[in-house]
Image: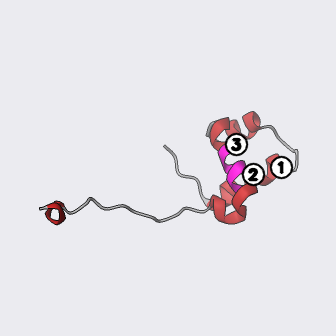
Amino acid sequence: MTNFTYEVKFSAVLKYIEGNESFHALAKEIGTTKYTLRNWVYHYQHHGTQGLKKSYTSYSDIDSTCFN
């Protein structure tokens, strides 16, 4: 899976929203699927620019000693 920068995502979303290109054409141009691009547009519409930025949440394994 390719990771895209915030700038690439934002540029693609704006091109779609402005009506310049279709999901299919944009996705092909940047090397992703139209479903991924649609997801970016959804996140942008519901969360603004924060929706396109990575969240750095990491989950650690549960310490098994706490269950003993």
Amino acid identity at mark 2: Val
Residue holding disc 3: 38
Q: CA distance from mark 3 to mark 1?
A: 11 Å
Amino acid identity at mark 1: Ile
Q: Is residue 51 left or right of residue 66?
A: right
Amino acid identity at mark 3: Arg
What residue occupies the far left of the structure in this picture? 68
Q: Are marks 2 and 1 in contact (CB under 8 Å)?
A: yes
Q: Judge whether 4 appears above or below 32 on screen.
A: below
Q: Is residue 62 left or right of residue 21?
A: left
- Please tell me how crowded label 2 is: few (under 14), some (14-19), or many (20+) other residues with Cα within 10 Å: many
Residue holding disc 1: 17
Q: Earlier in the sequence, mark 3 or mark 1?
A: 1
Q: Are marks 3 and 1 in contact (CB under 8 Å)?
A: no
What residue occupies the far top of the structure in this picture? 24
Which of the two residues, 58 or 13, is positioned nearer the viewer here? Answer: 58
Q: Earlier in the sequence, mark 2 or mark 3?
A: 2
Q: Which residues are magenta?
A: 39-44
Q: Position of residue 60 (x, y in %)?
A: 31, 62
Report if residue 41 lies within the magenta region.
Answer: yes
> Residue 54: which disc?
none
Q: Position of residue 9 (x, y in %)?
A: 67, 54
Residue at point 71%, 49% (across, down) = 42
- Please tell me how crowded label 3 is: few (under 14), some (14-19), or many (20+) other residues with Cα within 10 Å: some
Q: Position of residue 54 (x, y in %)?
A: 55, 61
Residue at point 67%, 50% (across, down) = 40
Q: Position of residue 61 (x, y in %)?
A: 27, 59
Residue holding disc 2: 13
- Please tell me how crowded label 1 is: few (under 14), some (14-19), or many (20+) other residues with Cα within 10 Å: some
